[in-house]
């Protein structure tokens, strides 16, 4: 009986050691130890347009015929033109394999390697050469990113904004769940030369606010690693079955004796 009691105590210790503590669920734990915390500002990186990106290009003019060419269904369905991925592909302008976008009447304009601001200026310059009293607006439609691992809603998301922080991305994915390790969050960032840069973030410490990965870029992948207790919790049903079997065996042996 002493052996069985010792085994039960060991099992209880294992269960309690696998529990998630409040500290493991808390972000920015070191802020409480800092009076009036001030963090260095991390500048949002300028994304350079790549082959395969999809751009929203709007040419506006006082001439209604120009608006009809560049903005189809401008007066009826402008709100619904970009409500899904299919619409983005149909109505957006794709950057082709040579780095150009082909815009009606304006011709081909090279945008690969340019920021959105630089691409806007390039398209405006081309517009001014051909049209009078016209302006151009350019937005990146293909800002997609993925959130994987221990979050409430893992998956691929589309960002319709010029900026996106790691905290915003996790919020859209429903936040890190109770099994997620906030000290081990990876950001995988593909580069144009077919390589991948990996950033390791500890969200329990404030220094991640100044990391280059604080602002996400298109095609980034955020991966939240699980806590060590995750594997134990997954196996709890198996352990319960084993414990029940052992208890039943002990009762049978006791009855036989």
Image (spheres, rainbow, N blue to C red):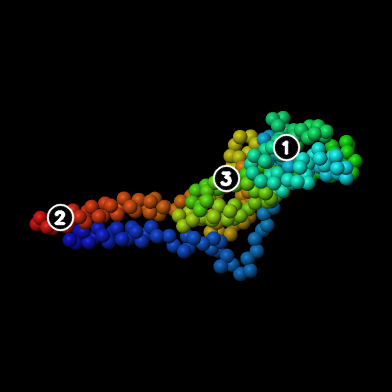
State which tag comes first along the sequence, 2 or 3: 3
Does any portion of residue 115 appear in the rendered image? no
Q: Mark 2 to mark 3: distance in Å?
A: 54 Å
Q: Nearer the viewer, residue 117 or 255?
A: 255
Expressed as whole percent of the image width and height from the top left, the position of residue 193 reads 63, 34
* Residue at (84% x, 39% y) in the render: 66
Residue 236 appearing in the image: yes
Q: For the point 61% across and 40% down, which residue is it?
A: 190
Task: Residue 29 in the image: state x and y as whole percent.
Answer: 54, 63
Q: Whole-Å distance between the Cαs marked 2 and 1?
A: 75 Å
Q: Residue at x 89, y 44 (%)?
A: 133
Q: Tell me: residue 212, above or below residue 111.
A: below
Q: How crowded is mark 1: few (under 14 residues within 10 Å), some or many (20 or more)?
A: many
Q: Where is residue 31 in the image (x, y as percent from the top left)?
A: 57, 65
Q: Name the residue under label 1.
A: 93
Of mark 2 and mark 1, the one earlier in the sequence is 1
Q: Which circle's residue, 3 or 1, is located before the other in the chain?
A: 1
Q: In which quarter of the image is the C terminus?
A: bottom left
Q: Which of marks 2 and 1 is in front?
A: 1
Which residue, given by chain and number where applicable, does mark 2 sit on? Answer: 252
Q: Residue 129: x percent and y percent?
A: 88, 36
Q: Is residue 234 left or right of residue 201?
A: left
How far is disc 3 from disc 1 in space, using C-alphas? 21 Å
Residue under label 3: 156
Left or right of 16, for residue 251: left
> In this view of the protein, which residue sits in the foreground, 92 or 139?
92
In the image: residue 147, left or right of residue 96:
left
Q: In which quarter of the image is the N terminus?
A: bottom left
Count of labels shown?
A: 3
Q: Residue furthest right?
A: 132
Q: Callout 2: helix, strand or loop?
A: helix
């Amino acid at each position: 009986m002493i052996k069985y009691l010792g085994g039960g105590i060991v099992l209880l210790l294992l269960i309690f050691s696998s529990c998630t503590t409040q500290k493991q669920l808390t972000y920015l734990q070191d802020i409480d130890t800092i009076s009036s915390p001030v963090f260095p500002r991390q500048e949002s990186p300028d994304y350079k347009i790549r082959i395969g990106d999809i751009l929203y290009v709007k040419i506006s003019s006082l001439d209604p015929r120009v608006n009809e060419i560049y903005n189809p269904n401008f007066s009826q369905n402008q709100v619904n033109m970009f409500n899904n991925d299919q619409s983005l592909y149909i109505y957006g302008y794709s950057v082709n394999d040579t780095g150009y976008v082909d815009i009606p009447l304006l011709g081909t304009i090279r945008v690969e390697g340019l920021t959105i601001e630089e691409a806007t200026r390039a398209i405006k310059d081309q517009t001014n050469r051909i049209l009078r009293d016209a302006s151009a607006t350019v937005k990146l439609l293909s800002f997609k990113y993925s959130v994987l691992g221990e979050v409430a809603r893992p998956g691929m998301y589309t960002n319709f904004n010029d900026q996106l922080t790691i905290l915003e991305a996790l919020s859209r994915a429903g936040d890190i769940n109770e099994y997620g390790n906030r000290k081990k969050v990876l950001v995988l960032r593909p580069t144009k030369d077919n390589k991948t840069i990996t950033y390791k973030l500890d969200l329990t410490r404030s220094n991640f606010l100044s990391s280059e990965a604080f602002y996400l870029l298109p095609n980034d992948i955020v991966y939240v690693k699980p806590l060590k207790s995750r594997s134990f919790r997954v196996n709890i049903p198996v352990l319960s079955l084993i414990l029940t079997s052992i208890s039943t065996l002990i009762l049978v042996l006791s009855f036989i004796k």
